[in-house]
Image (cartoon, rainbow, N blue to C red):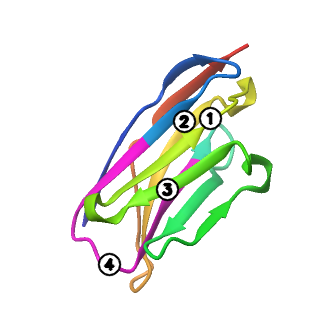
Amino acid sequence: QVQLVESGGGLVQAGESLRLSCAASGRIFSDNAMGWYRQVPGKQRELVATITSGGNTNYADSLKGRFTISRDNAKNTVYLQMNSLKPEDTDVYYCIFYEIATRLRYWGQGTQVTVSS
């Protein structure tokens, strides 16, 4: 089992920045990927960005250039730097931990990001 604890969400104005963090604990296999998805109630959860333990990243095309994902493998923590935030970025952001060997996925509880215009 893997437990995920997210932090960093909140209320900001358009154009401002936020940084989300997600720390994983428990049974951590070294070959994994971590990342972020987001979801508005009633809609499907969508990819924001992921990063493997080897540092390979994948972003939603619409977010490239504004959002940056990074990780600290020693701390089993992934970060999402969100710049130039827009009201349409308002969502619940969910951390994901993906075990590559077992294909198991673990989700965080979600953190609310609200961007006012």
Of the numbered discs 2 and 1, the one sitting upstream in the chain is 1
* CB atoms of marks 3 and 2 within 8 Å: no
Marks 4 and 3: which is nearer the front?
3
Q: Which mark is residue 41?
A: 1
Give the overall secondary structure of the magenta segment. Answer: strand
Marks 1 and 3: which is nearer the front?
3
Of the numbered discs 2 and 4, the one sitting upstream in the chain is 4
Label 1 and label 3: CA atoms lie apart by 27 Å
Q: Which residue is mark 3?
A: 70
**Residue type highlighted by circle 2:** Val
Under tag 2, what secondary structure? strand
Task: Give the quarter of the figure containing the C terminus.
Answer: top right
Label 4 and label 3: CA atoms lie apart by 16 Å
**Residue type highlighted by circle 1:** Pro
The image quadrant that residue 53 belongs to is bottom left
Q: Residues within 10 Å of mark 1 (few under 14, many from 20)?
A: few
Q: Which mark is residue 76?
A: none
**Residue type highlighted by circle 4:** Ser
**Residue type highlighted by circle 3:** Ser
Label 2 and label 4: CA atoms lie apart by 27 Å
Q: Which residue is mark 4?
A: 30
Marks 2 and 1: which is nearer the front?
2
Of the numbered discs 3 and 2, the one sitting upstream in the chain is 3
Label 4 and label 1: CA atoms lie apart by 33 Å
Segment tinted magenta in the rendering? 21-37
Residue shown at the point (45%, 48%) measured from the top left: 79
Of the numbered discs 1 and 3, the one sitting upstream in the chain is 1
Task: Give the quarter of the figure containing the N terminus.
Answer: bottom left
